[in-house]
Amino acid sequence: MKKNKLMAYFCVIVLFYLAANFAHPVTPTLIVERNLDSSMFGVALAAMMFVNFLFSPLWGKLCMYIPTKRIMLICGIGYAVGQAIFGMATTEIMVVGGRMFAGIFTGGMFTAFSNYVVNTSPDQNERGQNLTILVTIQNVASAVGYFIGGMMGVISVEFAFICQIVCLVIAGVLFFLCCEDDTKYKHKPEKALTLKDANPFAAFLAAKSFMTPMLFLIFAVVAVAGIGQNSFEQCFNYYIKDQFNMSSVYNGIFKAVIAVASLVANATLCLWMQKKTDTNKSFLPLMAVQTVFLAFVLVNSSIASFAVCDVMFFALNAVRMPLLQNMVAMRTTPENSNQVMGFYQAMNSLGSIFGALFAGLIYDMNPMLPFILAAAAYGISVLIGGVYVGKYKKNKA
C-alpha cells in the first residue's frame, strides 16, 4: 500500500513538473510581443525566487504541523493563480507581481516534495533512492514540459499559459487525494505555531538550531552553484531568441534532448556514484566538469557549441542535484528534517534570485556577460566544495 502511494505521488509529480514548465519557453516571446523591457526575462524570475527564498523556511516549518499533502494542494492552486496573473500581464509591474505571487507557493511546493520523501522514507538507503527519483523526475519532466510548452507556443502564448494553469490545479488536487497523511512519521512540535513563526526571517534565524560547519558549506555550494546555473539557463533561453531569432520550438527541442540525457545520466552515472563512491567527495569532480562546459561557451559562442554545452551541463546537473540534496538529508534528524530541507530549498532559491537577476540586468551591457557570471559562480562553488571535501576527509580521519 505504501509503495502504491509513493508511486502515485511520483506520477503526480511528473504532471506538476510538466505543467510548471509550459510557460518558460514562451516567456521570451511574451516579453517581445508585449514590448516589455528585455531585462524582464531575468528580473521576473528573480522576483519569484526572492519570495520563494523568503517563504521556503516557513513552509518547512508548516510541514511540521500539518499534513504535507495539504500544503501541496494549497500551493498547487496558489501557483496556478500567480501564473494566471503573469499570463495576462501587459506591463512590467504585472509580470513581477504575478511572478512574486506564484513564488510564495512554489517555495511551499518544492519544500513539501522533499519533505514528503524524507518523512515517508525512514531508511537512509531508501531515502537516497527516492530523492534521486524525485530529482530525476524534476529534471526529465521539466525538460519534457519545456518541449511541450515550446510546441504550445506555436499556437499562442496564451494557450501555453491556460494549459499550465489547468494542469497545476489538477496536480494540487491529485496530491491531496493520492498521497498518504505523513503526520505519523513526523516529530510532533512541543508548542503550537504562532504569528511569530509566520515571520520568514524568524525561520532563518531558527537555522542556528541545526546549522553545522559542514551543512553551511553544502548550503554555500548549493547557493553559489545556483547563481551559475540560473544565469546560464535564463540567458540561454533569451539569447537564442534575441541573437539567433529562434522560436520557442527550438527552446523546447533543446530541453527534450536534455530530458533524454538527464534520464540516462541519472540511471547510470548517478546510481553508480551513490553505490560505488563516497558522494561527499565524488560530487566535486562532477561539478568541475560542469565548470569546464560553462567556460567553453566563453571561447566558442556558435549556436552548435551553445547547444552541446547546454545539454551536457544540464545532464550533469541532473546528477549533481540529488547528490547534494542527499548529502543534506543525511545530516538531518527526525526533529529537524523538515526545517533543514526547507532551508535547502531556500538556498536553491537564493542562487536563483541572484543568477536570474544579474543575468537580466547585465545582458544589455553585453550578451556574453551572464555566461561569464555563470562560469565564475560555478568556479567559486567548486572552490567551496574543495574546502568541504578537505574538512570531510579530516573529520573522517
Image (cartoon, grey):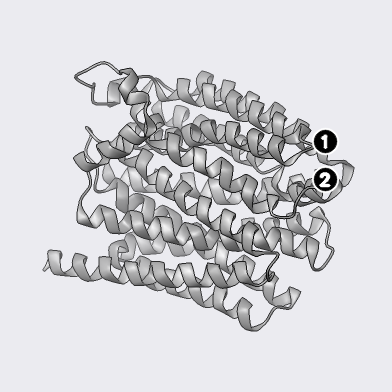
Residue under numbered circle 2: 153
Q: Between residues 74 and 211, which one lies in front from this camera angle?
A: 211
At a point 49% along the width and 73% down the height, the residue shown is 291
Most extreme residue toward the top is 192
Q: Is residue 64 above or below residue 23?
A: above
Q: CA distance from mark 2 to mark 1?
A: 7 Å
Can residue 11 be spotted in the picture? Answer: no
At a point 58% along the width and 25% down the height, the residue shown is 78
Residue under numbered circle 1: 159
Can residue 296 be spotted in the picture? Answer: yes
At label 1, the amino acid type is Phe
Q: Is residue 97 left or right of residue 219?
A: right
Q: Is residue 336 left or right of residue 13?
A: left
Q: Under tag 2, what secondary structure?
A: helix
Q: Give the image quarter of residue 286.
A: bottom left
Q: Are marks 2 and 1 in contact (CB under 8 Å)?
A: yes
- Residue 170 lies, in percent from the top left, at 64, 24
- Residue 243 lies, in percent from the top left, at 79, 68
Q: Is residue 32 above or below residue 79?
A: below
Q: Between residues 61 and 137, which one lies in front from this camera angle?
A: 61
At label 2, the amino acid type is Gly
Most extreme residue toward the right is 155
At a point 46% along the width and 24% down the height, the residue shown is 71
Circle 1 packing at 10 Å, graded few (<14), some (14-19), many (20+), is: some
Q: Under tag 1, what secondary structure?
A: helix
Circle 2 packing at 10 Å, graded few (<14), some (14-19), many (20+), is: many
- Residue 312 lies, in percent from the top left, at 58, 69
